[in-house]
Image (cartoon, rainbow, N blue to C red):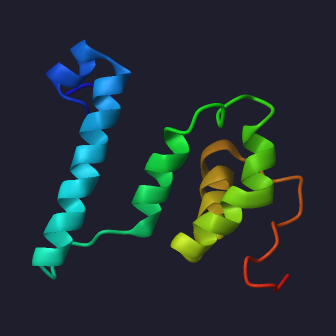
Amino acid sequence: MNRFHAGLLETAAGPSIGALADLGNLMLKARDSGLSEDEKFRFSELFNFATQNTPYVNLYWVRPTLDYLFLHSMREVASPGAYQRQQRQRRKQYGQQSILPKPLDPFGGF
C-alpha cells in the first residue's frame, strides 16, 4: 500500500488503472449495500469520484469558482453539514477561515 491506499498494481500501472480500480470498488460497495444492511453506500462517495475524475475541474481558476457556485451545495445535499465540517477542519488544521460568505443553501434558504 502506498500513502493513497493503492496497491502495488495500481501504483505501478498509473492513475488510469487506479481510477478504474476505484470505480470497481464503488460498484462492489453499491452491490454489497444492496445485499447487506450493514454495508452503507453514500451518494457523496460517488459524487467525490465523479468530481475527482472530471477533466479540467482541478484547474487553479476553475475549482474555487466551481466549489463556491455548485459543489458546496451538492456536497451539502449528499452529506448534510459537510460545509460546517470542512470549515471546522480548516480552522483546526490550518488556523484559517473562509473570506467568502457561506454558499447558498441548495433548497432556497440562506
Inspect this view and state whether residue 4 appears: no
Extreme residue in the right direction: 100
- Left or right for 55, reference 61: left
Q: Is residue 42 visible?
A: yes
Q: Residue at (71%, 29%) from the top-left corner? A: 59
Vertical relation: 79 (above or below) 65: below
Taking the image as shown, residue 79 lies to the left or right of residue 87, namely: left
- The residue at 75%/29% (across/down) is 60
Quarter of the rendering occupied by the N terminus: top left
Say which of 102 and 77 sits in front: 77
Q: Is residue 64 left or right of residue 34?
A: right
Q: Please name the residue shown 67% across and 57% down the image.
A: 71
Please determine whether, in this image, residue 18 is positioned above or below residue 74.
Answer: above
Tell me where residue 23 appears, x and y as whole percent: 30, 45
Q: Residue 11, how many percent across, how many down?
A: 26, 19
In this view of the protein, which residue sits in the foreground, 49 or 99? 49
* Residue occupying the far top of the picture: 12
Count of marks placed on residues: 0
Asked where in the image residue 106 lies, by quadrant, the reply is bottom right
Quadrant in which the C terminus appears? bottom right
Residue at x 73% of width, y 59% of height: 70
Q: Quadrant of residue 57?
A: top right
Position in image of residue 53 (x %, y %): 49, 38
Q: In the picture shown, does residue 82 fall above or below 71?
A: below
From the viewer's perspective, is 51 left or right of 97?
left
Up the image or down, 63 lies above or below 67; here it is: above
